[in-house]
Amino acid sequence: MSWQKKLLQLIKQSMNQKIAVAVDVSTDDYPIETIRNIISLFNEVRESTPLVCADFKIREITDTSKVKQLTFHSHGRASYTDVLEWGQENDIEKLFYITDVTGHFWEELKIDYDVTWLIPDSYKPQVPFGKTFNLV
């Protein structure tokens, strides 16, 4: 089964949950068209899903129906803390985070919701919590 079908299943499985999508915009080395397609898929299945764009800080909070263009940076510095805290503060039940998982985690951060790390590569990083899902 292709990763697209598996991702569609994951989204559909969370139909009764409050979900959000986050995009790590700290690097422009990602397959950007794939990321745009993922955001479109979320919007088709769960219209107006909250969307958070962040690198070492949150750059934009919008939703999947309003995103016109994603601005990616080339500095490579990412921290997941602000987005994960935003999820906690907004009672998110499942967060889908598009990233290569090479950023910083605050050690004391406690997350009590599901996180699925959507990795646009075949690299399988260690994550401190949640599940990884490779987009290849």
Image (spheres, rainbow, N blue to C red):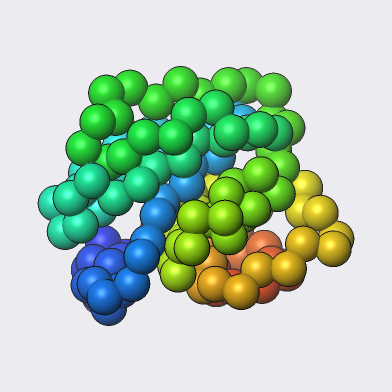
Residue 108 is left or right of residue 44, and the answer is right
Furthest toward the left, the residue is 44
* The N terminus: image quadrant: bottom left
Residue 101 position, x and y percent, is 65, 53
Residue 62 is left or right of residue 130, and the answer is left
**Which quadrant of the view contains residue 4?**
bottom left
Residue 123 is left or right of residue 81, and the answer is left
Residue 69 visible to an observer of this rendering: yes
Residue 67 position, x and y percent, is 29, 29
Residue 16 is left or right of residue 50, and the answer is left
The one nearer the camera, 80 or 87, is: 87
What's the residue at 73%, 68% (across, down)?
110
Residue 136 position, x and y percent, is 40, 58
Furthest toward the right, the residue is 107
Query: Eyeballing the image, is 61 above or below 128?
Result: above
Query: Eyeballing the image, is 49 above or below 126?
Result: above
What's the residue at 24%, 31% (across, down)?
66
Residue 102 visible to an observer of this rendering: no
The one nearer the camera, 90 or 106, is: 90
What's the residue at 27%, 23% (across, down)?
68
* Badge count: 0
The one nearer the camera, 59 or 25, is: 59
What's the residue at 24%, 72% (across, down)?
15
Residue 78 position, x and y percent, is 69, 38
